[in-house]
Image (cartoon, grey):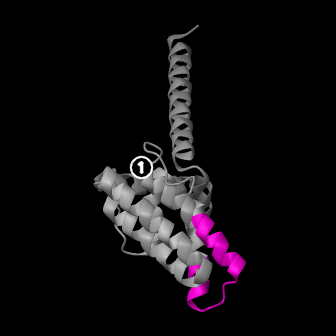
Amino acid sequence: MSTGILATIVVLAVLVVVLAALTASLVARSNRLRERFGPEYERTVEGEGGRMAGERELRAREKRHDALEIKPLPAAARDRYVGEWQGVQEEFVDRPRDAVHDADRLVTSLMQERGYPTEGFEQQTRDLSVEHGGTLEHYRSAHEIEQLSTTRQATTEQLRNAMVHYRAIFDELLSDGGRAQPAH
């Protein structure tokens, strides 16, 4: 076999190995993002118009999130939020619309105290998606119903569902992503 043919075979073999390593790296990165963001991964990929753009957006969220100073709640603050949540639940009996607004306010306050910026709903969801992708759809659903409630278009059943959705994200935020006990 000539030296030229042997060199070509070696170069092709190296290219195949490099291509395989690159592919494995990309698959591993996609899997890591899919695992970290949960359902938010598919939502973002679809919303951004493809896997590469979606993953770029998710990595940007991670980078922004890493710059935030997210902190667990002290026990006293956690207890205060649990008490406030119980008050919101009790309020639902007589004033469901007000209770939903108060639940929204309480979740936003909890986010802020944990260190999340609260400059707008879309940014809130992007920031929350990094650690709370599994419960983020609850927050979106609750917020949508809360918006309907502002114009008095939400039914009592929708308001009840909003409370259930707010409770899911509230518990997740209160428990520091599962590292502390949720409210009961």
Residue found 46% across the figure and 48% down from its top: 177
- Residue 78 as seen in the image, left or right of residue 121: left
Q: Quadrant of residue 135?
A: bottom right
Magenta-span inclusion, residue 176: no
Is residue 29 visible in the rendered image? The answer is yes
Asked if residue 107 is positioned above or below residue 14 in the image, the reply reads: below
Give the answer, above or below, for where 98 lies relative to 70.
below
Q: Pick whichever, 150 or 77, lies toward us.
A: 77
Residue 158 image offset from top left, x and y in percent: 68, 77
- Boundaries of the magenta span: 145-165
Residue, far top: 1
Q: Residue at x 51, y 28 (%)?
A: 21
Dot 1 amino acid type: Asp
Reading the image, the residue beneath label 1 is: 176
Number of numbered discs overlaid on the protein picture = 1
Mark 1 element type:
loop
Dot 1 alpha-carbon crowd within 10 angstroms: few under 14, some 14 to 19, many 20 or more: some
Q: Position of residue 63 (x, y in %)?
A: 35, 53
Where, quadrant-wise, is the N terminus in this rendering?
top right
Q: Position of residue 132 (x, y in %)?
A: 50, 53
Q: Residue at x 38, y 56 (%)?
A: 79
Q: What predominant SS class does the magenta segment belong to?
A: helix
Name which quarter of the figure residue 49 lies in: bottom right
